[in-house]
Image: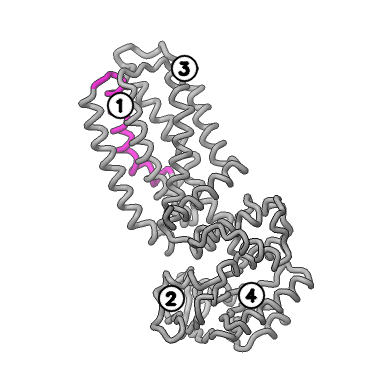
C-alpha cells in the first residue's frame, strides 16, 4: 500500500442540464474507516462515486485527495491510489480472469505480476487456471473478478458501488470480512449501497436526499 | 523495454486478443473490402477503362475501397470500450497516451492486414500495373498511417457521443478528404513511374500525418478524460 490517503469533499453538486442530481454534499473518507453513501434510487450514489474517483467532474464543489499530510494531489494522480468496483465498470469479457488481471497490472506499469494475480483470484474464490472467457462466467463470478481487479495493485483507497450485488451468501460474508479487514489495515473505504446489511458496515455516513 | 512501451503493448495485445476471439472488426472490414472489390472487378474489370485513364481511375478506385472498408471497422476499438462499459476501468488504470498509442497500433495493424490482402488482389483482378512499386508502397504506407491516426482520433471523439451511428463517417470525411486526394495523386504518379509526383505527394501526406499525430497527442487526453 502506498500510504494513507484521505478524501474530503465539500459542497459537491451535480446537475445534468436543468436536472439537479444532488447538491451541497459534504463528507470525509479517512483511513481506517468505512464511509457509506446511501440514498434512494436515482439519488446520485453512483454519480458521486464517479466524481470521487475522478471519472466525472462536479458542477460545483471541492474534492481533495491527500496522501498523509501532504498538499492535495493532482486529479490525474488519484487513479494510482484507487481500486473501484461498480456496476457500470466492467472487465473484458473476451479475456479469461487471469488475462484480465494481467492486463490491468501491465497497464498500471506493474508488469505481468502473475503471483499477485493468482493470489487475488484465489482470494475472491476464482480459479486462476480456468481458461473460460469472462463471457462464460455467472454474474456473481464477474463481480468477484471485479473485486480482484480492484485489489490487484494494493491501493490505499477502495470504492465500492453495490459490491455485494450478485454475490451468494458466502461471497457476501467474504466481502464483509474483506472490507472490514481492509479498513483495519488503514485503507480508506467508500461504500455506496442501498443494502441494509452493507449499510451496517459503515463508520460514517453520507445520505443523499434524492 | 520501457514502462510506457510495455503498457501500450498491453493495450495493443489485449485488443488483438479480443479481436481474434470475436472477429468483429476483421469481419466488418474484410467483408466490405472483398464485396466492394468483387463488385468493382465484376462490373468494371481490367478492360473497360481506356488505357489513358487507367492509372488515375484505378488509383482512385483502390483508395475508395480502402477508405470505405476502413470506415467499417476502425472505429470499433473505442466504441466497444464504451458500449461494454470497460472504458471507465481503463481510464483509471492506464495513462491516456498509452491507450491512444495502443489503439493506434491496433488500427494500423488492422489496416496493414487489409492492405496486404486487398492491394495484391486488386492489382491482379483489375490488371493494375505499377511502374514504381517501391514508391507505390511508400504512398500506401504513409497514406495508411495518416488514415489510421485520423480515424483513431475521430473514433475516440465519437465513442463519447450519444448518437454514434453515422457520426464516424460524417466527422472523418472532411478530415480525410485532403488525404484521399493526395494519395490518389501519389498512387497515380507511382503507377506511371513519375517520381517527382510521388515525392510531392509524400511530402503532403507526411505533413498531414504529422499534424494529426501532434493534434492527437494534445487532444486525446482531453477527449478521453472529460
For the residues labelled 4 and 2, the Cα–Cα distance comes to 20 Å
Q: Place residue A141 in its image quadrant.
A: bottom right
Q: Position of residue B129 (x, y in %)?
A: 36, 16
For the residues labelled 2 and 1, the Cα–Cα distance comes to 54 Å
Q: Position of residue A140 (x, y in %)?
A: 73, 64
Q: Which residues are magenta?
A: B169-194
Pointer 2 residue: A59
* Of marks 4 and 3, the one in the foreground: 3
Between B222 and B8, the residue placed more toward the observer is: B8
For the residues labelled 3 and 1, the Cα–Cα distance comes to 21 Å
Numbered circle sitting on residue B135:
1
Chain of the residue where label 1 is placed in the rendered structure: B
Mark 1 neighbour density, 10 Å: few (under 14) some (14–19) many (20 or more)? many
Chain of the residue where label 3 is placed in the rendered structure: B
Q: Residue furthest bottom?
A: A203
Dot 3 or dot 1, earlier in sequence: 3
| Secondary element type, mark 1 | helix
Q: Is residue A126 left or right of residue B174?
A: right
- Say above or below: B158 vs A58: above
Chain of the residue where label 2 is placed in the rendered structure: A
CB atoms of marks 2 and 1 within 8 Å: no
CB atoms of marks 3 and 1 within 8 Å: no
Mark 4 neighbour density, 10 Å: few (under 14) some (14–19) many (20 or more)? few
Pointer 4 residue: A41
Dot 4 or dot 2, earlier in sequence: 4
Identify the residue shown where x is 58% and y is 77%.
A43
Identify the residue shown where x is 38% and y is 45%.
B149
Q: Position of residue B181 (x, y in %)?
A: 30, 33
* Of marks 3 and 1, the one in the foreground: 1
Pointer 3 residue: B125
Amino acid at each position: 500500500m502506498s500510504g494513507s490517503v484521505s478524501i474530503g469533499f465539500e459542497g459537491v453538486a451535480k446537475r445534468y442540464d436543468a436536472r439537479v442530481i444532488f447538491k451541497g454534499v459534504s463528507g470525509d473518507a479517512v483511513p481506517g474507516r468505512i464511509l457509506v453513501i446511501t440514498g434512494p434510487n436515482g439519488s446520485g450514489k453512483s454519480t458521486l462515486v464517479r466524481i470521487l474517483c475522478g471519472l466525472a467532474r462536479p458542477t460545483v464543489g471541492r474534492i481533495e485527495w491527500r496522501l498523509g499530510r501532504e498538499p492535495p494531489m493532482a486529479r490525474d494522480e488519484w487513479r494510482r491510489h484507487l481500486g473501484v468496483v461498480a456496476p457500470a465498470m466492467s472487465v473484458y469479457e473476451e479475456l479469461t480472469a487471469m488475462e484480465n488481471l494481467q492486463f490491468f497490472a501491465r497497464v498500471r506499469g506493474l508488469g505481468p505480476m502473475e503471483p499477485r494475480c493468482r493470489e487475488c483470484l484465489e482470494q475472491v474464490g476464482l480459479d486462476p487456471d480456468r481458461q473460460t472467457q469472462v463471457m462464460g462466467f455467472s454474474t456473481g463470478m464477474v463481480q468477484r473478478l471485479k473485486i480482484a481487479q480492484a485489489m490487484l495493485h494494493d491501493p490505499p483507497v477502495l470504492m465500492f458501488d453495490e459490491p455485494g450485488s450478485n454475490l451468494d451468501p458466502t461471497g457476501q460474508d467474504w466481502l464483509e470480512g474483506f472490507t472490514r479487514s481492509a479498513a483495519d489495515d488503514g485503507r480508506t473505504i467508500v461504500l455506496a449501497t442501498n443494502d441494509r446489511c452493507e449499510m451496517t458496515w459503515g463508520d460514517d455516513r453520507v445520505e443523499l436526499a434524492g | 523495454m520501457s514502462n510506457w512501451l510495455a503498457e501500450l503493448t498491453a493495450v495493443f495485445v489485449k485488443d488483438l486478443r479480443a479481436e481474434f476471439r470475436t472477429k468483429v472488426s476483421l469481419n466488418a472490414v474484410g467483408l466490405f473490402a472483398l464485396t466492394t472489390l468483387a463488385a468493382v472487378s465484376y462490373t468494371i474489370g481490367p478492360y473497360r477503362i481506356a488505357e489513358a485513364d487507367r492509372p488515375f481511375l484505378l488509383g482512385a478506385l483502390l483508395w475508395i475501397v480502402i477508405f470505405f472498408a476502413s470506415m467499417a471497422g476502425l472505429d470499433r476499438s473505442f466504441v466497444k470500450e464504451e458500449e461494454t462499459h470497460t472504458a471507465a476501468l481503463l481510464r483509471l488504470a492506464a495513462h491516456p497516451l498509452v491507450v491512444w498509442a495502443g489503439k493506434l497500433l491496433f488500427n494500423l495493424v488492422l489496416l496493414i492486414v487489409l492492405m496486404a490482402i486487398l492491394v495484391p488482389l486488386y492489382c491482379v483482378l483489375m490488371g493494375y500495373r505499377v511502374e514504381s512499386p517501391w514508391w507505390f508502397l511508400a504512398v500506401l504506407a504513409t497514406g495508411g498511417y495518416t488514415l489510421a491516426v485520423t480515424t483513431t482520433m475521430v473514433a475516440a471523439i465519437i465513442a463519447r457521443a450519444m448518437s454514434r451511428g453515422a457520426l464516424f463517417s460524417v466527422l472523418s470525411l472532411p478530415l480525410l478528404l485532403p488525404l484521399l486526394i493526395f494519395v490518389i495523386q501519389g498512387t497515380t504518379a507511382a503507377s506511371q513511374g513519375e517520381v517527382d509526383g510521388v515525392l510531392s505527394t509524400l511530402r503532403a501526406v507526411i505533413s498531414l500525418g504529422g499534424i494529426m499525430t501532434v493534434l492527437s497527442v494534445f487532444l486525446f487526453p482531453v477527449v478521453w478524460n472529460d
